[in-house]
Image: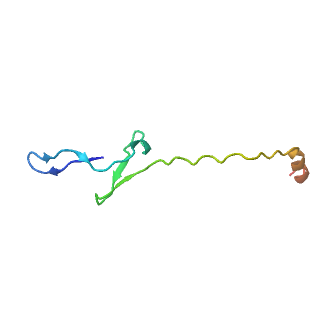
Amino acid sequence: MMVVEFAAGSPPRMGRPRPLFEYDHLALLCASVRCFDVAPDGQRFYTVQTRTPPAPPVVTHISLIQNWFDELKAKVPAGR
């Protein structure tokens, strides 16, 4: 994000661009819309930043349930 000093007038005067702050532009959620907005008081920027999802847990066991449909039929009588 860059900033430029500005002085109104005819013609207006603009200084040299300089970095305002650094950010990871690849982490912003941008599509075909603007990736940031300025707070109403003009003192802050708001962005939406992606987070890397946590790694899925490691599978340590598998539960195998056999004949579960027979058990279901026994617990839920027909006609219900």
Residue 26: x percent and y percent? 42, 41
Name the one closer to the observer, 14 or 32. 14
50 vs 55, left or right, is: left
Q: At which x and y percent is residue 21?
A: 31, 50
On the question of residue 40 being in view, the answer is yes
Query: Is residue 78 among the parts visible in the rendering?
Result: no
> In the image as oriented, which residue stretches furthest toward the top?
32
Q: Which residue is drawn at 60% across and 46% down?
A: 55
The percent coordinates of residue 65 (x first, y second) are: 84, 46
In the picture, measured across the screen, residue 7 lies left or right of residue 63, that is left
Task: Classify residue 34 by image quadrant.
Answer: top left
In the figure, is residue 65 to the left or right of 59? Answer: right
- Label count reads 0
How does the figure colour the protein chain or chains?
rainbow
Q: Residue furthest bottom?
A: 41
What residue do we see at 91% from left, 51% from top?
A: 74
The residue at the point 87 percent across, 52 percent down is: 76
Across and down, in percent, residue 39 comes to: 33, 57
